[in-house]
Image (cartoon, grey):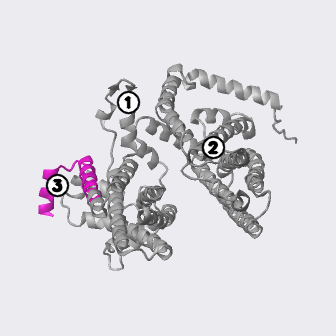
Amino acid sequence: MTTTRPVAPPASEARARVQAVRQGYARRGGRATVRGRAYPAYLVALFTVFYLVPVVHARSTSPAPFSVSSVNLSAGAAPLVCGLAVAVCWGGQLVGRFWGPLVVQPFLLHVLMSTDLSPAHYLGTIARRRLAYAGTVTLLAVCSAAYLATDLFDRPGTALPGLAVTAGISAVAAAAWLWGQVRSVRDNFLLAGAVGASALVVAAVSGAAPDGRYGHWLAALVPALLAAAVGPPAFRALPSIDLARLARESARASQARAYAWTGTLHHALDLYRPEPRGFASALIRTDGSLRGYLAQGAVRALRTPGRAAAAAVLLPVGGASLTHGVAGSAGGPEWWWWAAGSVGVYLGSGWVGETWRGLRDELTMAPLFGGRWGGLPARALAWPVVAVTAGIFLGGALVALFRWPLPAARAGSTVLLVAGSVVLVLAARFLREMKLHLPLELLLPVITPFGDLSGLRVVAWQFDGFVVVLTGVALMNAVPSATGSAALAVCLAAGCVGAGLRRTGWAHRGLLSRLRRG
């Protein structure tokens, strides 16, 4: 008895068959139209003319905010670049686990999977093209940020090493993006640990000999070697990729893309929210009664350990950055620390638990859960408020060890500004979590001499939490008095809470009557 094995087609034949499938798919309506390409080009042109060109002109005619001329690149470049390469590698791996470069349209993937072609034939071309796009975009973004924020590219002596470093960082980002999708979770943890350990070794070696002549070129060589070590194994894993998991990722990405294009971005993000699991019995005591408010929130946070771990990292880091910026903010560069810390706390406050969603459900479905308030706000908001306050206190205490003692007046203003920022951030998170479907009035045209700008209203609605946090911090920084800034933050927070309640259908008059009955 003889068995026949399928013979792999030659590379040229496989390439022709894959191209034929893609052309057939494009003819069924998958190819972008001229009008579909014209609108993004129009938005890019508006952004370039009214934002990018003025910013570049202002940078070219004024000194850079951060100067690297006083920094010994040979001595300090290697540790800094190693840390940046590690952050980019870990970030690329994390993004690849959720939305990697091999995510394609579900129908096209189904057709290709139904053939006798190896996954390397139809996924290899897609991976190479998208990695080239990702590397190019990352290179341009990093170079633009370095040009606008520093004077790295003002002199040939620092421009060439800087360009080499940014090219290596871009290659690392692209290679790690593919690795995060095609390799298993165990392989991703091994790579993350190996990259972190190697960065520590290189930083220690460079610190032991800080006067090396070619330290900046060593800093450029490290990310290049890292990209060369990660890229080829990732491509070799294409034939053994889990096609079933790739099909599920492509289906979820297609659904998320449809949600994003129709205006409901929060629904698209909900598709990537991990499902709570485990610890369900821990919510109930042995006598059958529910645990306290804080215990319930902590248990619900542990049911999504990934989000809880991210919040446990972001809240102290954001609190430290917020405290550092507030303690020395005088309209200078430390204002960016304040804004960055507020954004970090805003993100961590949403990842600290699922109680925000429970509060939204109870407010929007009052006939199902009951119309009386009772202990609803305390039950839902006790854990987020306590967790956020504890994280910020921990981060602020670490900063206090290095910056204190401050003058008595400055210490009091720092406490006021941090408290006001926390209140503003929690109110912005409440506003974002009470969001429902896209309001129809946002789709009405806004005719201006520059065209229809209704899309800006939709973008502001999608990212309203970030808009509130950044705008509020900017206004607080503009107020000369710390007491006035804290009062302004409380007023903005009250407005956010009122807008969030209106989103759930709770009018002011009905809210007051419910509070009297509760």
Q: Is residue 438 visible?
A: yes
- Could you tell me if the residues under marks 3 and 2 are in contact, i.e. CB atoms within 8 Å? no
Q: Earlier in the sequence, mark 1 or mark 3?
A: 1
Between discs 3 and 2, the one toward the N terminus = 2
Mark 3: which amino acid?
Leu
Point out residue 362 in the picture as x, y percentages from the top left corner. 27, 56
Secondary-structure class at tag 2: helix
Disc 1 and disc 3: Cα gap in Å? 35 Å
Answer above or below: position of 511 versus 417. Answer: above
For label 2, the crowd category at 10 Å Cα-Cα, with few meaning under 14, some 14 to 19 and many 20 or more, is some
Looking at the image, residue 55 sits to the left or right of residue 473; the answer is: right
> Tag 3, which secondary structure?
helix
- Quadrant location of the C terminus? bottom left
* Residue 453, disc: 1
The quadrant in which the N terminus is found is: top right
Location of residue 111 (image quadrant): top right
Residue 511: which numbered mark, if any?
3
Residue highlighted by disc 2: 143
Q: Which is the main secondary structure of the residues drawn in magenta? A: helix
Q: What stretch is highlighted in magenta?
A: 489-518
Q: Residue at x 45, y 62 (%)?
A: 325
* Front residue of 113 and 184: 184
The amino acid pointed to by label 1 is Leu
Q: Is residue 11 magenta?
A: no
Label 1 or label 2, whichever lies nearer to me, is 2
Q: Position of residue 223 (x, y in %)?
A: 73, 53
- In the image, taking residue 233 as reference, residue 273 lies left or right, namely left
Locate residue 482, reporting x and y percent.
Answer: 31, 63
In the depicted view, which residue is nearer to us: 205 or 406?
Answer: 406
